[in-house]
Image (cartoon, grey):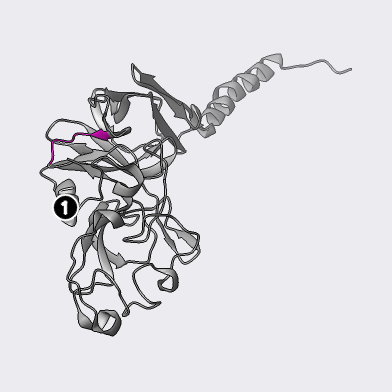
């Protein structure tokens, strides 16, 4: 075996590798960032991944407890987002705070055994849909002027026509839409044709178009697209007293199919559209997926379509 003539040179080599080789690998190594959230009273948070490489996305999901609502995410006491869930790109280790607010609504009142919420408007609004037992249930679907549900919704089996949209036999303001030019000039559902009154009794009834407009008036209420127990819909909060109702996005029944469930709120009024009486007014609301704006307005629909009913009482 040959002896090492220059042992000092090997030490220099090892030192060189240590100083320069390891330093280079540290520069190449991707930084691991830690994401955490402080959650106080009112809920908890799900984090998609708490340790990720810089540049990756993380999603935070706030889950309010019963009686609380999500408010926002803050960082160093500054609001960074009001989205829930909130997705962002991680650039460094970060600790957020999630904020919840205790809901100000008190226990609803009751009318003939069904709960209502007093929003401080001209009428009190039911806490859930006709046919439902909790706010997030879709409940039953009714053609306008009919008082029971069915499996198929079309002009062929609509109660107040003879199979077509221009053969109306009740609630008609134009001769060209009535059977044999029939006109009765009725503009609002009779209580005997009101799904709310017939199914719930008491003083319950379907809201008029004017009462729905009152609910949509931005001076009266704030509409927020949200999710309640996994069900999409609008939380409608009164600016007068802070109380609220939840309208699930129950969609509608058309022919034999359920459409737009989870995406659209569609709720009948008791008011006829006079210019074209084969249509009636209803609230339509959804979240515009393109502009991220909440959209809600008074619209008209063919009377035979099956839609939800959210009742009111005096």
Image mark count: 1
**Residue at left offset 53%, top offset 34%:** 28
**Residue at left offset 39%, top offset 53%:** 263
**Residue at left offset 68%, top offset 19%:** 10
Element assignment for label 1: helix
Q: Position of residue 293 (x, y in %)?
A: 26, 51
Mark 1, residues whose alpha carbon is within 10 Å: few (<14), some, or many (≥20)?
A: some
- Residue behind mark 1: 213
Q: Is residue 63 above or below residue 122?
A: above
Residue 95 is drawn in which quadrant?
top left
The reply to whether the magenta stretch includes residue 128 is: no
Q: Nearer the viewer, residue 221 or 48?
A: 221
Residue 208 is drawn in which quadrant?
bottom left
Q: Position of residue 107 (x, y in %)?
A: 27, 24
Q: Position of residue 250 (x, y in %)?
A: 40, 50
Q: Nearer the viewer, residue 25 or 187?
A: 187
**Residue at left offset 37%, top offset 19%:** 38
Segment colored magenta = 116-121
């Amino acid at each position: 075996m040959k002896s090492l003539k220059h042992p000092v040179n090997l030490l220099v080599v090892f030192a060189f590798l240590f100083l320069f080789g390891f330093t280079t690998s540290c520069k190449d190594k991707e930084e691991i960032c830690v994401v955490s959230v402080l959650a106080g009273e009112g809920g908890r948070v799900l984090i998609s991944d708490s340790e990720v490489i810089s540049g990756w996305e993380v999603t935070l999901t706030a889950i309010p407890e019963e009686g609380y609502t999500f408010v926002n995410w803050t960082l160093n006491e500054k609001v960074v987002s009001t989205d829930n869930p909130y997705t962002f790109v991680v650039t460094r280790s970060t600790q957020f705070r999630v904020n919840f607010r205790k809901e100000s609504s008190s226990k609803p009142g009751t009318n003939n055994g069904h709960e209502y919420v007093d929003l401080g408007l001209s009428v009190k609004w039911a806490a859930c849909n006709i046919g439902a037992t909790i706010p997030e249930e879709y409940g039953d679907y009714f053609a306008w002027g009919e008082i029971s549900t069915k499996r198929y919704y079309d002009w062929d089996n609509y109660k107040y026509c003879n199979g077509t949209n221009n053969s109306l036999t009740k609630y008609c303001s134009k001769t060209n839409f009535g059977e044999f030019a029939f006109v009765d000039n009725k503009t609002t559902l009779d209580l005997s044709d009101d799904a709310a009154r017939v199914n719930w009794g008491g003083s319950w009834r379907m809201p008029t178009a004017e009462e729905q407009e009152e609910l949509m008036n931005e001076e009266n209420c704030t509409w927020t697209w949200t999710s309640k127990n996994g069900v999409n819909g609008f939380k409608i909060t009164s600016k007068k007293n802070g109380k609220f109702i939840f309208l699930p996005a129950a969609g509608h029944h058309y022919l034999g199919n359920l459409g737009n469930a989870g995406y659209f709120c569609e709720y009948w009024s008791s008011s006829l559209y006079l210019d074209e009486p084969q249509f009636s007014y209803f609230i339509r609301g959804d979240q515009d997926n393109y502009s991220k704006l909440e959209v809600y307005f008074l619209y008209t629909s063919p009377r035979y379509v099956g839609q939800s009913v959210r009742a009111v009482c005096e």
